[in-house]
Every structure is written in C-alpha cells, then in structure tokens.
Image: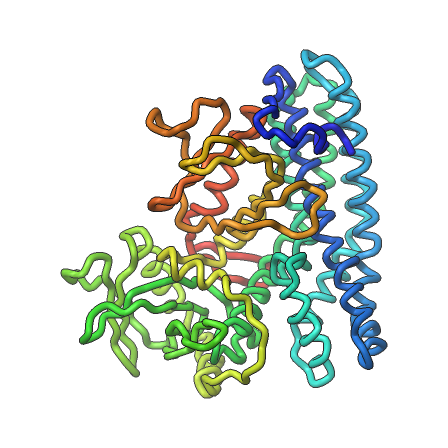
Amino acid sequence: MSPTLSDSGSARADDVEETSDKMDEAYYITKEILSTETSHLKDIEVITLWLEKALSKGGNQQETLEHQMKPLFSCMDPIQLFHQEFLQQLEDVLSLWEGRSARTKDMQILGDFMLRNMTALRALLPSLHKLEEVFLEMQRRCPGKQELDTLLQEFEQQRVCYLPFSCLLLKSLQRPLQYEKLLERLCRHYPPSHHDYNNCQRALGEASAVSSRLRHRLLHLQNLQRLDQLEKDLLGGEHLSSPGREFIREGCLYKLTKSGLQQRMFYLFSDMLLYTRKGLSCTNQFRVHGRIPLHGMLAEDSHSSVPHCFTIYSAQTTIGVAASSQVDMRRWLDDLNAAISRAPRYSELSALSLQQPVLQAPGQNHHPNTLSHVCWYRNQSVSLTDHITMMENQLSGYLLRKFKNSNGWQRLWVIFTNFCLYFYKTHQEDAPLASLPLLGYTVSVPTFSDPVTCRHVFKLHFKSHVYFFRADSEYTWRRWMEVIRRGVSSPGKIGHLAEDGIIVD
C-alpha cells in the first residue's frame, strides 16, 4: 500500500507525526480522493464478495437466489474494476509525490491522471444506469422474492454490512457526485496559469457530465430507500413505499396529553403525518399509533406556555406537540405547511394508505439502532434534504482519537457516512470496531480548558460526551470539521420531488 495508508509504526499512536503543511493543497485533495476511494471500494466488496459468500450458503434455494442476484453482480463487475484500477493509480501518484521534496509546489501528472480516469468514469454510465434498474427491482415487493428478501435481511445482521444494504447499493451512484465536488475544490486551488489547470477543468467537465445524469435520479432513489427502510423498521409501517409518496422529515416531538408531555416519533410524508410510540417488543421497534392525512390539515404556532409548541388541526383530531428547540419547531412548521399546500394532489394516495392495517407481521429482522432511534434519544429531526446533503459530504481517513479523561491518543481509520462515524483498527479491516452517531453533536475547536495542546484537533461534544480527534494537517483538520458540520447540521429546508429533480420552496 501507499505510504499514505500504511499501517507501519502504528503501535504507538503518539508517534504519528503531522504532515508538513508546506505540501501543496492539491496533494491533500488527492490524498482525500485516495482515502475515500479506499472506503468506497470496501463498500463495493461488501456487495460483490461478502454477499456472494452469503449466497453460497443459500441451501436448496441457492440456484434461485443466484439467478435473482445475477443482474446485480453483472453490473457491479465493471464498476468494481474501475474503482480497483483508479485506486491503484492513486496510490502510485501519491507515492511519487511523497517521494519528491516536501517543498515541491506542483504535481505535473495530476491533471492528466484525473482527466483519464474521469473520462473512463463517463464510459461507466451504462453500468451505473443498470445498477439503478437493479436497485428499483430490488425495492419491488412480489411473491417470488420472499427468499431473497429473507437472505438480505439476514445479511444485514452481519457486522461487515455496517449500513442497510440499500444504502450500500446507492453509494456507487453517489460516488461521481463526490468526485465532482473534489475536482471543483482542485480547480479553485489552481490559478488559470497553472499547467494542470486546463486538464483539471476538463476532468471536472467529465465528472459533472456523469453527475448531471445521475443527480436527479438519485433524489428519487434516496426517497425510495428511506421509504423502504421505514417500512421495514416500523411496526405497522406497511405500504409506506407506495408509488408517488415522498418522505419529507422524521424526528422526535413531545405530544401534549392530559398526563403531560409524552415523547413520540413523527414521520412527515407528502400525503400524511404518521406518529409512533416506542415499542416494548423484543426488537424495541417503534409502533405506528396514528396516521393523519395532510389534506385539510392546519399547523400553526400555538403560543403556549410550553416552549417550542405548535398545534396540528385536522378533521380527525387536534394535537399539540413541542419540539426540542425553536429551530426544530420552525423546521417542522415550514415543512408541514409546505407539504399541506401540495396535499390535494396526494389525497387519493393518502386515503389508500389510511385504510391499511397498523399491525406488522412478526418475524422480521431489525437493527436496534436505526436512524429513528438516534433521533429519539438525541431529540433531533432529519429531512430528505439532509439525506441528500449527507450524500455529498462523506469522508474517511486516519485520525487520532482521545476521550475526555484519557491520556493517550488512539490511531483509527474513521469513516463518516449516514450521519455517523464508524471506527476501524485499520483501513484493511472488514467490520467496524464501534460507531458514533453524530446527530445532536457539535463540532468545534478545543478551548483553553480542554486537556489538549496539539495542533489540528477538533472536538465533538453532546451534553457530557466529549471526544477529541487529531488530523495530520491543517487541510485535513478543516475538511473533517467542514464535512461534519454540513452533514449533520444542515438547514434541513424542505424540498419536494418532481419529474425533473428536487424543487426547494
């Protein structure tokens, strides 16, 4: 492996020295592409390697399951090959760069290298479109797919499958958007007179051409993924992924009752508002308690003595709820009123959904720490727009971690994705050691009272929970803080899906 990702000398974390800040910023951008590409290839291997191993244990259904999964593996083969070759070339580029003087201010082969690979990425579009078709097919519920659905549910319980399987499938479609953002950063860094500027601009053009072909469809697919996941996670959540429905926001609110404030999870869709109670089942799932159609609904600030309270009026019921903050209350009210204004076109869909039973068939596997659980325990809410922002703000790399009351630093490979940090011993490990959901956390610079004196340290804190992370350069330190802030603390403004993409009101 490249010295950039080498594990040698990691026995003593305090020996890890910070990279010279004299290196050109283009070097750190390239290093970021390498580290995120390393993580992305591992995600692909969860599908192509680990899922294939699970299929080999399919018993009497193995032949049928392999036939059903053949379209997925056939479109993943060229995608995996592209990323394997790109990663190997990235390692060579970084090795060459690190072998030169730290004072070198340019890298003459970078622009040509990125242009060649982004051109190859554009040639990969047919396979990416095929993956989209496979994703849509896997979301369909039909009688002949029960065995496959069961296999995937069991596979998601393995530690190597650290995200819902549908999230992993979407990552290959999201990756070109991340290339585009990184190349935009590279082009802003180079002046027009730089010898690499023209090729980097052309590489950006290639990446943008691919992203533009995928972006609008990704909004639709991200919506389907969240609807499908909620259908699996909620007791009584059948038929949530009905065609035409849009997920808008989910989060914790406190319902005003005669006995006081009672915590509930609320889910806002384009046609209805659904709320749940924390279940007492062995899986600790949320159970659907009520569905309220948006057509004819009114939501407004109640000006109550209860802080951050608003009232929801409908033909069926009137309920008062309180948010955790003024900001969250405004987000809910803005999203509710924008959705209500569009609700007439969804009234038929809502009527069909409200006729569905609210009991789910038993026996479904379930992750105990879903996004809904994180929202519940952290008093947070997340919108579809937040999911889309998170899609473009993902990062990975080695960091040193220190707990609030510990003395030494621990070197870990860290991945930030889906509102969560995942910790691995090294980048070569298959399954995470632990994870830290970041909803509700604040990222900041340590203060004078904090027990750290090193450079390039950022602080994560939520109530009494405090963590310190140390990066190897000022660029990397800034990027981690920037990406976490954007990915976790986005404004969450409502958007709704249309045939040509997302419309922000």
Q: Is residue 275 visible?
A: no
Q: Picture quarter containing residue 412?
A: top right
Q: Nearer the viewer, residue 308 or 153?
A: 153
Q: Residue at x 48, y 86 (%)?
A: 356
Q: Residue at x 45, y 63 (%)?
A: 372
Q: Nearer the viewer, residue 299 or 378?
A: 378
The x and y percentages for residue 91 are 78, 32
Position of residue 434 relative to residue 401, above or below, is below
Coloring basis for residues: rainbow
Q: Residue at x 68, y 11 (%)?
A: 103
The x and y percentages for residue 28 are 64, 27
Q: Picture quarter containing residue 31?
A: top right
The x and y percentages for residue 270 are 45, 69
Quadrant for the N terminus in the image: top right
The x and y percentages for residue 163 are 61, 58
Position of residue 252 relative to residue 292, above or below, is above
Report the side of 189 relative to 372 (left or right). Answer: right
Report the side of 159 relative to 199 (left or right). Answer: left
